Amino acid sequence: MQDEMDILREVGSIAAAHGSMALSEILGKKITLLIPSIDIISTSGIPKKMGIKDTGIAVICRIFTGLRGESVFILDEKNAFRLLGLSHTISDDVKKSEAITEMGMSTIKEIGNIVINAYLGAISVMLKKVILSLPPTLISGTIDEMLNIVITTSGVDDYALLVEAVFEEPQEKIKGCFYLVLSQKAASDIRESCKQMLEDLGKK
């Protein structure tokens, strides 16, 4: 399994490189997107990975080709504000507000969409499938409530590919999480693709 995770981490590195360029353009400053950890867990194990009572914001995209599942990008409230603080398009008054404004919500949705599609694009290459998602929606609440909504509405409750996302710039280090909530078949397809890549590498 460790070797399979190594391949998924490499996919994450490719996604991070593409995501970094897009985020730097959106936020107007040099941003490095890092993917320090990746794991495949049961959806019942997700709450153990996060502070489920924390409030936050989730960007959700339903995958409609290539895999069965949902992609979810989650920021807790503290990191959402910190991420908005990096944006050159948001005024200082808005940044100091105690509530996230409509402009702030739109910016987070755009950032989440970039992270999601960067990873789906990298997974597409690995699986040799076209993987596309529907336009993103945005919800807020406790992390526990948001994850329950995603799992319930997706009709998929088997596995989650958990990807830690870290946004770095010289003065800030901001953490978020990205999940692919997958059907058993989708998780199996990813694992089988990893095994095939390892076999191909072994033959060389």
Image (spheres, helix red, strand yellow):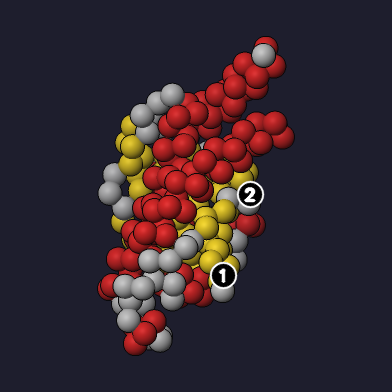
Q: Badge 1, how many Cα within 10 Å: few under 14, some, many 20+?
A: few
Q: Write down the residue under mark 2.
A: 37
Amino acid at dot 1: Pro
The answer to whether mark 1 and mark 2 are in CB contact below 8 A is: no
- The residue mark sitting in front, 1 or 2, is 1
**Does 179 sit above or below residue 69?**
below
Image label count: 2
Q: Badge 2, how many Cα within 10 Å: few under 14, some, many 20+?
A: some
Instruction: Point out residue 175 in the picture as x, y percentages from the top left corner.
Output: 56, 63
Q: Which mark is residue 170?
A: 1
Q: Residue at x 31, y 73 (%)?
A: 89
Quadrant placement of the C terminus: top right
Element type at marker 2? loop
Q: Quadrant of residue 90?
A: bottom left
Can you see residue 191?
Answer: yes
Q: CA distance from mark 1 to mark 2?
A: 21 Å
Q: Residue at x 30, y 66 (%)?
A: 106
Camera-side residue of 51 and 76: 76
Instruction: Point out residue 120 in the picture as x, y percentages from the top left corner.
Output: 43, 40
Camera-side residue of 185 and 124: 124
